[in-house]
Amino acid sequence: MRRGQTVNIYIYAFLLFGACFGAATFSCRYLFSEGPKKIPDPPGGPTLASRVFWVMVCTFLWPIMVLTGVNSALILARRRRHSAA
């Protein structure tokens, strides 16, 4: 296998993982982009266009989305800890 083909495999794996990440996290996307407070869906519910857009964003930016998700999880854990005390 040539070097260029190996690089392509890594790029394809990166994009495939991002697309799967986007498809898996669509229902809790508020944790990754809008903060830990859930924004209500539009009256008709989520559209196909919103799902496709979310998957496209995550395909290319999934490392950033993971970091923002971790940050939101820490904020929520801190809030739960303070409310329990």
Image (tube, rainbow, N blue to C red):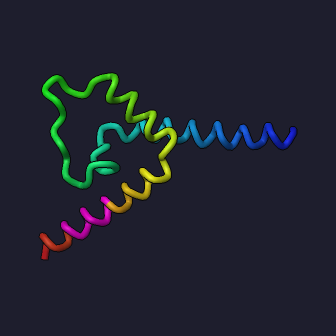
In the picture shown, does residue 72 fall above or below 2? Answer: below
Q: How many marks?
A: 0
- The residue drawn where x is 87% and y is 39% is 2
Q: Is residue 22 left or right of residue 26?
A: right
Q: Is residue 80 left or right of residue 47?
A: left
In the picture shown, does residue 2 fall above or below 42? Answer: below
Residue 82: quarter of image: bottom left
What residue occupies the far right of the structure in this picture? Answer: 2
- The residue drawn where x is 20% and y is 26% is 45
Q: Is residue 62 left or right of residue 2?
A: left
What main secondary structure does the magenta stretch of the protein show? helix
Q: Residue 69 in the image: state x and y as whole percent.
A: 37, 55
Is residue 77 shown in magenta? Answer: yes
Quarter of the rendering occupied by the N terminus: top right
Q: Residue 30 in the image: state x and y as whole percent.
A: 27, 46
- The residue drawn where x is 27% and y is 65% is 75
- The residue drawn where x is 43% and y is 34% is 55
Residue 49: quarter of image: top left
Q: Residue 9 in the image: state x and y as whole percent.
A: 71, 39
Is residue 69 shown in magenta? Answer: no
In the picture shown, does residue 63 fall above or below 76? Answer: above
Quarter of the rendering occupied by the C terminus: bottom left
Residue range in magenta is: 72-79
